[in-house]
Image (cartoon, rainbow, N blue to C red):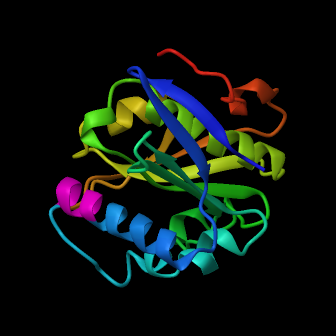
Amino acid sequence: MYYFLLMVLSMNVTIKPLSNNSKEIRRVQEFLFAMIKMEFGYGYIPKWHQDIIKMDEYYIEPERNNFFVAYSQAGEIIATIGIRSYDKDFPMFRGIYSKEDTSSIWRLFVDKRYRRCGLASKMFSIAENFANESEYGEIYLHTHKTLDGALEFWTKMGFVVVLDSNDELETVHMDKKIHGLDINPLANDFSLAVKL
């Protein structure tokens, strides 16, 4: 069972998987839609946000999928990250990525008050270790050049750009090979306070 305690700017942060608790799922959904509104300027769009509406189907029930949530000492949701089997049907990636071998990162959001202190890196480290333990060979994600610092962050995490779509959303597709990597199992052990 994943459960972590992390010290961020002298505050205790607890990171744990989202459980199938309807009240907690609702809180996470509200956090996600607030972050989407803040970052992208729009609300719920059915074709883009089905995973948020059906979190149990996308993240909780499938054995090789997970959704991690960071809570402040006061119990406030301050960060999220989802990892699931690759389930997109982008024509340019047919035959390259598969649900068996490719995991994908979704919904990494950090409350503005907790940014630039290492929390996003810790959230990704937990997701990466989960993907490795679930025997995925790679991690896929897409991000947008319009998101402040996103491309630089993912590059720092070891991702490489595989396609710059040059579309209206400025979408960039990236991946990271993890098959055969010796990922430090202690990267998931945040039971001791970590000073960032």
- Quarter of the image where one finds residue 115: top left
- Which residue shows up at 34% across the image and 61% down it? 31
Q: Is residue 66 left or right of residue 80?
A: right
Q: Position of residue 142 (x, y in %)?
A: 44, 53
Main SS, magenta residues? helix
Residue toward you, 95 or 17: 17
**In the rendered image, the vertical position of residue 128 relative to residue 37, given as above or below:** above
| Residue 151 within the segment the image draws in magenta | no
- Which residue shows up at 66% across the image and 29% down it? 190
Find the magenta span and give its range: 34-40
- Which residue shows up at 76% across the image and 62% down it? 64
Asked whether residue 158 appears in the rendered view, the answer is no
- Quarter of the image where one finds residue 32: bottom left
- Residue furthest to the top: 195
Q: Position of residue 135 (x, y in %)?
A: 84, 50
Q: Is residue 195 left or right of residue 136?
A: left
- Which residue shows up at 70% across the image and 57% down it? 102
- Give the total of numbered labels: 0
**In the rendered image, the vertical position of residue 195 relative to residue 175, given as above or below:** above
Residue toward you, 120 or 46: 120
Residue toward you, 130 or 88: 130
**In the rendered image, the vertical position of residue 121 relative to residue 94, given as above or below:** above
- Quarter of the image where one finds residue 38: bottom left
- Residue furthest to the bottom: 46
Asked whether residue 114 appears in the rendered view, the answer is yes
Q: Position of residue 95 (x, y in %)?
A: 69, 65
Q: Position of residue 163 (x, y in %)?
A: 45, 49
